[in-house]
Amino acid sequence: MGKEKSRTKKPTTPVRQKETDIEGLIDKYSPVLLLIVIALGLWLRIADLRADPPPDLSWSFAPYTDEGLNTYSARNYALYHNFKQDDFFPFCVYPLVNIIVAFVFKIFGIGFVQVKLLSVFAGVLGILIIFLFARSGGNKIAGPLSALLLATCYPLVMYSRLGLVETVQILFLLLAGLFWVKGLKKTFLLLFSGFFAAGTFLLVKLSAIFIVGVFFLLFLAQIIAVRRKEINLRQLLFNLLWFISGTILAFLFWFFFVFLPYRAEYIQYVLRHSTESPAGHPGTIPAYLLNTFTVGLRSRLFPRTVWMVLIGYLTLPWLAKDKNPVLRYSLLWLIMGTLMLGYMNYRPPRYEIILLPPLIIAFATALSNLWKDGILIPASRPTIKMTIAFLLFLWPLGLQSIIYLSGFRAFPGSGSESGILVGALIIALAISLAGYLLFRTRRNGLVIKHRLLRTILVLIPVILTMRLDIGQFSHWFTNRTHNLISYARDLDRLLPDDAVVAGSWAPPLMIESRKRAVAITDWANMEGLIERFGVTHLIMGENEADMKLREKIDPWIWEKSQPIRRYIVRGQVLTVYSLN
């Protein structure tokens, strides 16, 4: 009998031991792998920081203008020792970024590189945090792979190279998730989860308010677990107490340093941007759904990361249904973030990059599971309820498929929302039914036992993703330009020391100058340019937004103005006017 038992065990033991050894080897050397990945991510983010962003990174001019506008308060503080100098006041909604950038300016001086340092630091630190976060779910391979994908993801790399707030926002979202997962075992860590969750929208960026919905549903799941006796009531109360304590700390910091000193500006900003937008807000439910389902479409965000997005999106709901806290948080992050973005018609790509980290985690987890277990189709008995839920999740994918196949020629306009939503729902229904029938006919799933075949199936999407990311970066790096910094230095030499320059392009072009720059927008600093600020020069572009601003400026100012210099940024002419 002993011999028979040993014979039956021999075929399976070496394979399992080999798998364990390889996984253990990856885990053992994960610190070394992580350092290599961080070094790669750092190089991609700091290589020639003075270069212009890619001209096709966004449909808007935000990559050129918004790092100067987002950190406008920081520049004012560095030069005039006061965050508020006029009506344009980003400090009230981006306080943490402006505080830190002002500190950087004080130490290293104001400049094109200095304004980007916080974003670069947040992007590199995000590589470490996503490694720890993905790994904390119990998957040792998903951590290094997630870190690699975030380090090289083209949109995340390029926006980390700009002085914007979104990279810091992503870092806070990852930290809130990491401390949530760790806090389920060490309760006091939920203090930090609450702090970073509340700090994401109070201190970094107000639109991150969707994180409230994420944690509401996470705690709702814990309440259900109490009813099912999966956790006890005392544990739930401790979790809630520590988490709320962290949110109170963030709230107190915001209340005393942001709201109390600048409550009028904060309320004005919130009321204005919640009711108004350069492109309006969806007016009907079909318009809102259409706007939500086209997130990432106009920005070409998902085509830039197509393999990662497709695999991550399709697998995330199935991975999250096993109650893994990392994947559950990632799924809620993706859903709530998408629903929030659908509220805004005006949606530059930098708003939408916050959706990429949960898709990276899902992509890495799905591939690592395939490599470890060989499960290509999991053993499952899908219910009608599960199929309907997946149908709704696939609905946006169906809509984007219709628009991509039409080559954007038939992009839906106002009044056609309902028809295209129904068509997208039919596509999603067909995919859901096909999946339902597949799982019902293959109840035992499909397992790939051959090690080499598993490895090939994992390497193909990873290589395709890396090739796409590195290829896009290499194309930009080979053809990069330095127009912004050269224009800024030329303008600084051209203007007298007492010049006061106004315009939507004034802050970005004056980042390296110590001359006064006044940002004008459709709602800020339009009145009294001469009386209030003593403006001596204007910088105006020829885009639609600047032309509308031009119409609002007093006509007599234009009668006294004279063009003295013209610059071209991404095909747009910027004219510098001298006011005699």
Image (tube, helix red, strand yellow):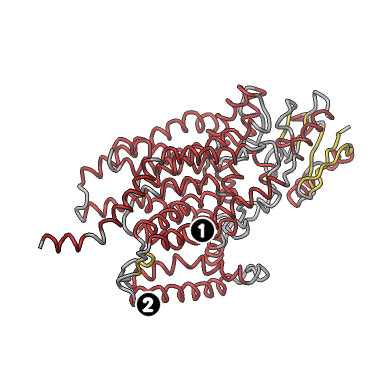
- Residue at which label 1 appears: 309
Residue 123, position as x, y percentages in the image? 53, 40
**Residue appearing at x 75%, y 46% in the figure:** 549
Residue 510 placement: quadrant: top right
Task: Point out the tag, 1 or 2, that comes first from the N-terminus.
Answer: 1
Instruction: Decide: is 166 above or below 359.
Output: above
Of residues 23 and 191, the one drawn nearer to the viewer in this rendering: 23
Left or right: 504 in relation to 324: right
**Element class at badge 1:** helix
**Residue appearing at x 42%, y 57% in the figure:** 367
**Residue appearing at x 42%, y 60% in the figure:** 452
For the N terminus, which image quadrant? bottom left
Residue 105, position as x, y percentages in the image? 62, 26
**Residue appearing at x 60%, y 50% in the figure:** 470
Mark 2 neighbour class, 10 Å CA radius: few under 14, some 14 to 19, many 20 or more: few
Of residues 395 and 243, the one drawn nearer to the viewer in this rendering: 395
For the C terminus, which image quadrant? top right
Instruction: Decide: is 507 above or below 14.
Output: above
- Residue at which label 2 appears: 437
Left or right: 458 in relation to 222: right
Left or right: 240 in relation to 329: left
